[in-house]
Image: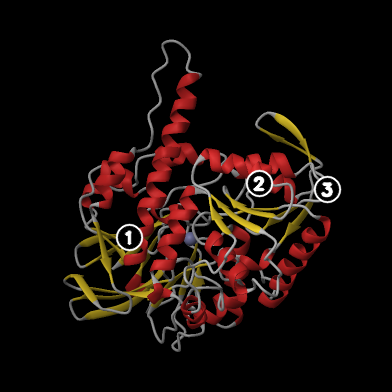
Amino acid sequence: MEIEFFGAAGEVTGSCHILRVAGRALLIDCGLIQGGGNAAARNRERFPFDPVEIDAVFLTHAHLDHSGRLPLLYKQGFRGPIYTTAASRDLLPVLLYDSADLAAREVERINRRREPGEPPATALYDREDVAQCLGQVKALRYDTDYAPFPGVSLCLREAGHILGSSSLQLDLQEGALRRRVVFSGDLGQYDSPILHDPHRFSSADLVVMECTYGDRLHRERDATLQELAGIIAEAAATRGNIVMPSFAVGRSQELLYLLGKHYDDWQLAPWKIFLDSPMAIEASKIYWRHVDRHDDEAQQLRASVAAMPALPNFVATRSVEESRAINAHRSFALIIAGSGMCNGGRVLHHLARNLPRRECHVIIAGYQAPGTLGRSLVDGAERVNIYGEEVAVRAALHTVGGLSAHADQRDLLRWYDSFENRPPVCLVHGEPEPLAAFKRELAARNIRGWAPGRGDIIDILAATTSTTNVR
Ligand code: ZN
């Protein structure tokens, strides 16, 4: 029984671990490495294992940094089942086809600039690879025990991060030895809109947990909502537009939900609310359809309206023409568009139009990686470059931090505290600083914790019985 850490070890993206037990090799997630630098090159590297030898994939959720290399895994010979929740199964095509399309466009761009005699670039995978890979997906119910292999029992538990997100509870057996290992997956904030809170566990022998924000506390939710209400009131007073760059899966739906819930108190009637992203529109349909994953409040809201989102002035724009037509609105347009970090997508033309106007407002609600346009805006740039043109930044910029889809340090500790037997912890999915900070928090509570590096192996039996663990 062992776990080998390949991805999201000492970093945030590219989640991928192998669990070896009872003669099987099981992959936990198979994510894309995202961000700038050498990410593209690293995604092209061979897997440090033979995809043919993987018996199954257990997928925690649909985000690309956890699922984005599944088509590549299939392309390189993996033919086993991919077990995940029904909601993740429904979201996967939205994300993976978009990822293939993005790769195709990128390759086209590279090949246009190709020198004569240079071999043409090829995409990491294409739509056909995605289709084949999706054929391997098997949906499982939450809170139900499955035994995909002798000695391996799997139960998916709510992780509260995005629709369909799960923590994996694995009961493993080799001979007379039994161990329970829990992989947190990405964990959401408690009391976040729409979704249930993360599952309360009671015991485990070993926990593998994310700590993206292991060193940070988000602003209280009430303060965040007041902040949003204030910005909307201000924009109404200045008679401008509001642009909200947003991730297609998760953040967009939360925003729409919050706008619907606070429609009256935030005086949204004079506004038109645009969701300008075909991908977010698709994801939203899936979000509203999986009613069983909604918390009590979301179910009540839903019961009181004809359709979600609960917004009479909601406009979903799919075509490029519809998207362009939004430009005619000089005031009272609230535009939610991707990409979330403003490094591409339709949000760019909305920013180009609205940034130079003092009466307009831009709300940045998510993490902005260094080198992205979103980061320049957060850092207070006075001029930015969009489509090769210089654009003056005169609109009011607002950074709203309390809407993160990730648990903060307090939430992570609250999640861990549900394990009454205080099991040892392997920390993954965090940059070095949050990892170190969260490890200190655990140490202060006398809990053993490690932050395994890429290629490190943890012997589960040794980790749960002695103090010499990483080899
Ligand atoms: Zn995620």
Residue closest to the eye, 237 or 25? 237
Question: Of label 1 and label 3, which has the lower sequence position?
Answer: 1
Q: Is residue 343 visible?
A: no
Percent of width and height locating residue 309: 52, 66
The label number, if any, that marks residue 358 in the structure image: 3
Residue closest to the eye, 392 or 445? 392
Q: Are marks 1 and 3 in contact (CB under 8 Å)?
A: no
- Disc nearest the viewer among 2 and 1: 1
> Is 211 left, or right, of 230 in this rendering?
left
**What residue sits right under mark 2 in the picture?**
370
Residue 383, above or below 416: above
Question: Of label 2 and label 1, which has the lower sequence position?
Answer: 1
Amino acid type, callout 1: Arg
Q: Are marks 2 and 3 in contact (CB under 8 Å)?
A: no
**Secondary structure found at label 1:** helix
Can you name the residue that lies furthest to the bottom here?
420
Q: Is residue 244 visible?
A: yes
Q: Residues within 10 Å of mark 3 (few under 14, many from 20)?
A: few
**What residue sits right under mark 1 in the picture?**
89
Percent of width and height locating residue 22: 20, 68
Asked where in the image residue 139 lies, by quadrant, the reply is bottom left
**How far is mark 2 from mark 1, CA to CA?**
31 Å
- Disc nearest the viewer among 2 and 3: 3
